[in-house]
Amino acid sequence: MNTTHPITYPCGCGDWTGYRCNWTGPADEMIVVEWMPEHLRASHEAAGNSGCWPHNGSERIAVKRSCADLLMEDDEEEWAQTLPDLDPATYAEREES
């Protein structure tokens, strides 16, 4: 019997928060978030908020949708945005089997 296992990805929220939740699942339960790390925000503002990903220092990560909601609540709108049209599998790290 040939059983196909779905590809799973860990949530990338730890890149943003410094600690990762324990969720792992399929890409269709994730969303891509683009955010500016706090340590780059002052220089980004000094440059007139110029540039766009990836040249401005912002990062894109794939996270579980509920983590994205929490992260977006905790950050200012100008520093983070969800990108629902992008494929999370492109930005997620594949779970090691």
Image (tube, rainbow, N blue to C red):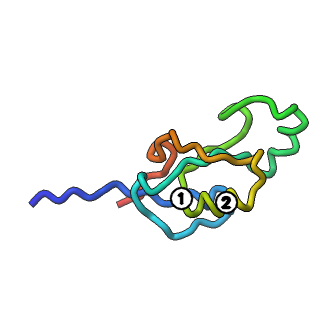
What SS does tag 1 mark?
helix
Q: In front here: 23 or 66?
A: 66
Q: Which residue is label 1 attached to?
A: 65
**Rendering quarter of residue 6:** bottom left
Point 70% across, 41% down: residue: 58
The quadrant holding residue 83 is top right
Q: Position of residue 78 (x, y in %)?
A: 77, 45
SS class, disc 2: helix
For the point 34% across and 61% down, the residue is 97
Q: Nearer the viewer, residue 19 or 77?
A: 77
Left or right for 79, reference 94: right
Q: Amino acid at mark 1?
A: Arg
The residue pinned by badge 2 equals 71
Which residue is at a point 80% across and 30% down the rendered structure image? 50
Crowding at dot 1, Cα within 10 Å, few <14 / some 14-19 / many 20+, comes out as: some
Q: Residue at x 49, y 50 (%)?
A: 92
Q: How many marks?
A: 2
Label 2: few (<14), some (14–19) or many (≥20) C-alpha neighbours in 10 Å: some
Left/right of residue 25 with respect to residue 47 in the rendered view: left
Residue that sits furthest to the bottom in the current view: 22
Amino acid marked by disc 2? Leu
- The residue most toward the right is 46
